[in-house]
Amino acid sequence: MKKNALVSFKGQKDIQATINLTGSKSESNRALIIAAISKGLVKVNNLSDAADTVTLNRILTELGTTEPEGRRTVDVGHAGTAMRFLTAYLATIPQQFLLTGSARMQERPIAILVDALKSLGADISYAKNEGFPPLSINGGLNNVRAEVSIKGNVSSQYLSALLIIAPKLLAGLSLNIEGGLTSRPYVEMTLALLASAGVSHSWKGDNIYIGPQQYQAATLTVEPDWSAASYWYSIAALADQAAIELPNLKEESLQGDSKIQEIMIGLGVNTQRTANGIALKANKNEAQTTAILNLKDCPDLAQTIIVCAAAKGLNLAFTGLETLKIKETNRILALQNELGKIGVTLNEENEVYTLNCEGLNFPEKVTFATYDDHRMAMAFAPLSLLIKEVEIEDFQVVEKSYPDFWKHLQKAGFTVQELA
Ligand SMILES: O=C(O)C1=C[C@@H](OP(=O)(O)O)[C@@H](O)[C@H](O)C1
Ligand SMILES: C=C(OP(=O)(O)O)C(=O)O
């Protein structure tokens, strides 16, 4: 049952806290597939608590331990990475699968990846709607050619899915990226984790090549999640004062969302290196950002930054938001609806999205809808520093990537009350 929570902050808005963030769900989900393909040669440390990681881990464990008669049904729920990575991985296993997910997952496109796998020889068909999950997969792909072309501007997860299985393919993989590349740091993360597991590649222009090769024994240690850290930046930006420690987070990270450090300087937060991680400090002499922010490399930061900027009354402009429409919800529409509740509009013209904060106001109480999207809940919760009572609908939605979010808010001095 979906439940709401009431979030508030009483007293001085001075946030002093040490928050131990969970592991990166992106790193975890890559590491899990790599570990499975390597047949245990590669081990993983510090896996994320994210529901998306727990789900993928359970699926891979079941695949390794139970042998069903006939077709096996695999349900990834809301987990985009699990859906995309398993489409490629299951295509290599000589069994039959029905790969499915939540109602929203069945609206998230997958044809680009399916077409690429089919061009390599995979036997995959659509069990319901053409171009979308669920998928019927007759596994056992053993490609005789390596060459494949793929559109890179819809989701980088399609590319990562192919790259992770590449070393295992008979002819390897020569991936030609067409139409530009979105979320590029996630592809770099995939290649970096493969390199840590002994897999080499070459990336020249629009071509990435991985030859057939063996994974080497390795332990992959997952770093804390930078996307989760972004909500603490927003809190620091909206508080009067803040000193927030985030242990074990590395300034130089495989995660592209570490770019939040740079972006948040313009919203009034400085990052300092500490003995074992980083600390966020509110800087009221903020250097205001005026340039257009391009979030193509870090789409998961979009909600954090846009909501935070809106609450600060900054009429910022953004590009690189096209892919937000096919994530957990149409995040553009969701943002437009919910920002409207504080009098802010987000307007698009020629793919440039601009905030208009002229009507910004903070009513005594606002209820924010979350659209089955964890990032809506976490991006809007910090507004409880400015709005007396913030009600977050379906508050448990955060489990997808950051299950301890509410517990951590409480630790930092927020009141979070579950409503009946
Ligand atoms: O590969 C990954 O781990 C991810 C890639 C990004 O998706 P797109 O490549 O679809 O933008 C990101 O939004 C998602 O949360 C995680
Ligand atoms: C888009 C996201 O996840 P996925 O695509 O893996 O469902 C996300 O975590 O914001």
Image (cartoon, helix red, strand yellow):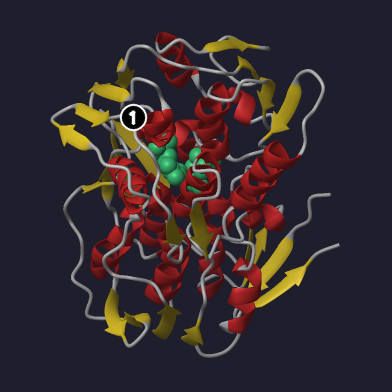
Q: Eyeballing the image, is 171 above or below 216?
A: above
How many numbered marks are there? 1
Amino acid type for the residue under numbered disc 1:
Pro
Residue 414 is situated, as x and y percent measured from the top left of the image, at 61, 79
Please report the residue visible at 74 percent of the width from the left and 26 percent of the height from the top: 73
Q: Eyeballing the image, is 271 above or below 29?
A: below
Residue 420 versus residue 74: which sits nearer the camera? 74
Name the secondary structure under disc 1: loop
Residue 109 is situated, as x and y percent measured from the top left of the image, at 51, 22
Please report the residue visible at 31 percent of the width from the left and 27 percent of the height from the top: 153
Residue 18 versus residue 409: which sits nearer the camera? 18
Q: Quadrant of residue 93?
A: top right
Q: Which residue is mark 1?
A: 212
Residue 107 versus residue 318: which sits nearer the camera? 107
Q: Quadrant of residue 332?
A: top left
Please report the residue visible at 51 percent of the width from the left and 34 percent of the height from the top: 85
Residue 89 is situated, as x and y percent measured from the top left of the image, at 53, 30
Q: Name the residue furthest left.
A: 205
- Bin the neighbour count of mark 1 within 10 Å (Cα to Cα): few under 14, some 14-19, many 20 and up: some
